[in-house]
Amino acid sequence: MKKFLLVITTGICLVSCSKNVSKPGAANQNVFFQDANVSVENMIAESPASSTVTISFTTAFENNLSSIELMSGTTTNNFCTAKSVDLSGNSSTKKNYTFSDSNAKSSTMYYLLRFKDNNGNWTYSNYLTVKVD
């Protein structure tokens, strides 16, 4: 578990400072990513089986969004959509999401979320680094 948390923390630390992420010691330490349209909490990545990664997260709110995509990559420079979910309407209640990637292509994988708003604009979260069993 310590190794798993170290991997996640490393992924968060390597991202651009232009993202709005809670700093350690901030009021809400569970926020992984937040902008005007969405707040993502407790994003966790696990590799429970060989070549499989499970990503779980909660949104505290969703405004003006039409979809959420889980994107994966073997490097931090090239991500492809692994899974997608269409959304309908705004939400001010917490929603839980779980995506499974059963085709991890490397021993180290990178995952991020891409949000499409109702105007067709995209926003990207920070990425997580995952060691695949």
Image: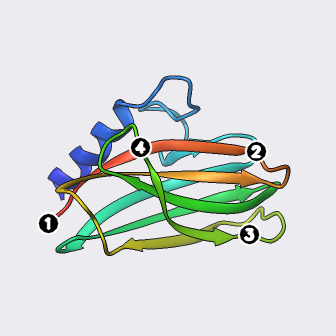
Question: Spatial distance from mark 4 to mark 1, Cα to Cα?
Answer: 22 Å
Q: Quadrant of the C terminus?
A: bottom left
- Which callout, 4 or 3, points to the residue nearer the camera? 4
For image coordinates 79% across by 50% down, the residue present is: 120
Q: Quadrant of the N terminus?
A: bottom left
The residue under label 1 is: 133
Which mark, by number, is residue 78?
A: 4
Which mark, by number, is residue 87?
A: 3
For mark 2, give the secondary structure.
Answer: loop
Circle 4: is it few (<14), some (14-19), or many (20+) Cα within 10 Å?
few
For image coordinates 53% across by 46% down, the residue present is: 31
Position of 75 relative to 45 (above/below): above
The residue under label 2 is: 121
For image coordinates 15% across by 51% down, the residue present is: 3
- Which callout, 3 or 2, points to the residue nearer the camera? 2
Q: Nearer the viewer, residue 120 or 112?
A: 120
The kind of residue tagged 4 is Asn
Position of 41 relative to 48 (above/below): above
The kind of residue tagged 3 is Leu
- Which callout, 2 or 1, points to the residue nearer the camera? 2
For mark 3, give the secondary structure.
Answer: loop
Q: Quadrant of residue 85?
A: bottom right
- The image position of residue 113, as x and y in percent, is 53, 53
The kind of residue tagged 1 is Asp
Circle 3: is it few (<14), some (14-19), or many (20+) Cα within 10 Å?
some
Q: Residue furthest top?
A: 17
Question: Spatial distance from mark 2 to mark 1, Cα to Cα?
Answer: 35 Å
Q: Earlier in the sequence, mark 4 or mark 1?
A: 4
- The image position of residue 4, as x and y in percent, is 22, 54
Question: Spatial distance from mark 4 to mark 3, Cα to Cα?
Answer: 25 Å
Q: Earlier in the sequence, mark 3 or mark 2?
A: 3
Left or right of residue 107, residue 13 in this image: right
